[in-house]
Image (spheres, rainbow, N blue to C red):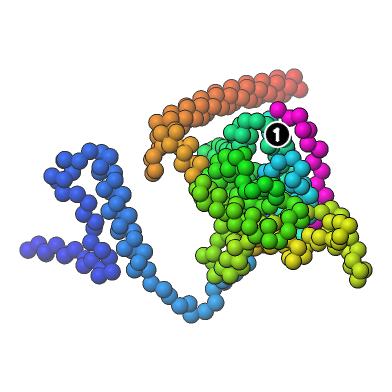
Amino acid sequence: MQAPPNPPPPVPNHLKSPLKLFNGNEMNNMRADDVTKKLDLRIGSDISDSAENIRTLKLNGHVGFDSLPHQLVRKSTKRGFQFNLMCVGETGMGKTTLIESLFNMKIEFPPCNSELKTVELLSKTYEVVEGSIHLKLTIVETAGFGDQLDKDKSAEVILDFINQQFEKYLMEELKIRRCLDYFDDTRIHACLYFISPTGHGLKALDIVTLKRLAERVNVIPVIAKADTTCKDELIRFKSKILSELRNHNISIYQFPTEDETVRAINTELNKLLPYAVVGSTDFVKKENGKSVRARKYPWGIVEVENEEHCDFVKLREAVLRTNVDSLRERTHKILYEAYRRERLRAMKVGDGETGPKMLETFAKINLRAKEIGEIYIEEMKRIDSQIHTLLEEKSKLETKAKKSRK
């Protein structure tokens, strides 16, 4: 008698039953797009359920991955950092002087030509070292801003420049062979917008430009040459500017308060916006013999780094000391992502799919790769044939030489 077949092994309790996606009737009545969407939803739901059930285990001994933060710090320090700062403001607002004061270094921009017919973007890149940290700093300045009658044109030139930097990064990102870690990232991380201290608030040029810039860059407004206005007037002027920004639905950058470690600091820094600043390249000796960066007047001196005189110290703390990485992160994750979505949609690429234009591009790339491969194979065959011919000739010569010796 033949023995009965062995029963199938039992399914372990910790394994889920197979995911049933569709029944027969449901499948027959669905289009391909609907099937894909439903599949994504059900599989995504299953993955989420699995993630919620992940157990937390305590190790019995030291393994070593607690050094991961230190590894990242070492790697980042070795690679260096990049920060790109744009200054937008009318001629004579002290943009270069303020940047020199912020970074304690000399920046050489050519003097602005007051007869420029359009806004010109001037860029300077420096390697700045503080301690063990190397910072690749790029300063972009707007020459001729506000000197033209066409307000929209001035804003458009600046916006085009910002978009061009996004486009460069996008083109690198879409390459088959890309190296984003070492790519020269020129995307603008922050924009200091200089507001004139004279007048009753924002000018029409300011409103037009700020509204457009806020969509593409982290805008930090500053009141230039604050030493020309008394404290009470500055308080009223700040309030007026904030009111006009709200009325025109202009979103300036708010320093993040989600992180508990900087919440208190950034909350106070946000209250001071827009920052009333003073810059100076001169050092003045006080009565106690100490030299300070200041502006000297007949009635006394205005110290750049004195919080009683202006918000310069707070601006430096906000932008450089506390939130450099936050500015870089928001540029990449929010502002650049918004630009990237717009461009991919223009290519008819939806979320989670590859659009016709991109497919066409990929097809061209694949065709070109195939052509290059075929050329390479033919070249290898030709070289192989030449080598074979040379070996045959060598063999004949060796045979002939042996016969001649005999």
- At horizontal 60% and vertical 40% (from top left) the residue drawn is 204
Residue 187 sits in quarter: top right
Residue 208 percent coordinates (x, y): 57, 39
User: Which residue appears farthest toward the left when viewing the image?
Assistant: 1
Q: Inspect this view and state whether residue 240 appears.
A: yes
- At horizontal 72% and vertical 46% (from top left) the residue drawn is 139
Q: Identify whether 1 is placed above or below 216.
A: below
Residue 155 percent coordinates (x, y): 61, 37
Q: Identify whether 12 is placed above or below 324.
A: below
Describe residue 320's horizontal placement relative to residue 328 as left or right: right
Where's the N terminus, which quadrant?
Answer: bottom left
Amino acid type for the residue under numbered disc 1: Asp
Q: Inspect this view and state whether residue 72 appears.
A: no
Describe residue 172's horizontal placement relative to residue 133 as left or right: left
Describe residue 370's horizontal placement relative to residue 80 as left or right: left
Front residue of 54 and 278: 278
How crowded is the residue under tag 1: few (<14 C-alpha within 10 Å), some, or many (20+)?
Answer: some
- At horizontal 38% and vertical 72% (from top left) the residue drawn is 55
Q: Mark 1 points at which residue?
A: 147
Give the overall secondary structure of the magenta segment: loop
Residue 260 among those drawn in magenta = no
Residue 228 percent coordinates (x, y): 76, 53
Residue 298 percent coordinates (x, y): 89, 57
Front residue of 252 and 263: 252
Residue 290 sits in quarter: bottom right
| Residue extent of the magenta highlight | 102-117
Secondary structure under tag 1 reads: loop
Where's the C terminus, which quadrant?
Answer: top right
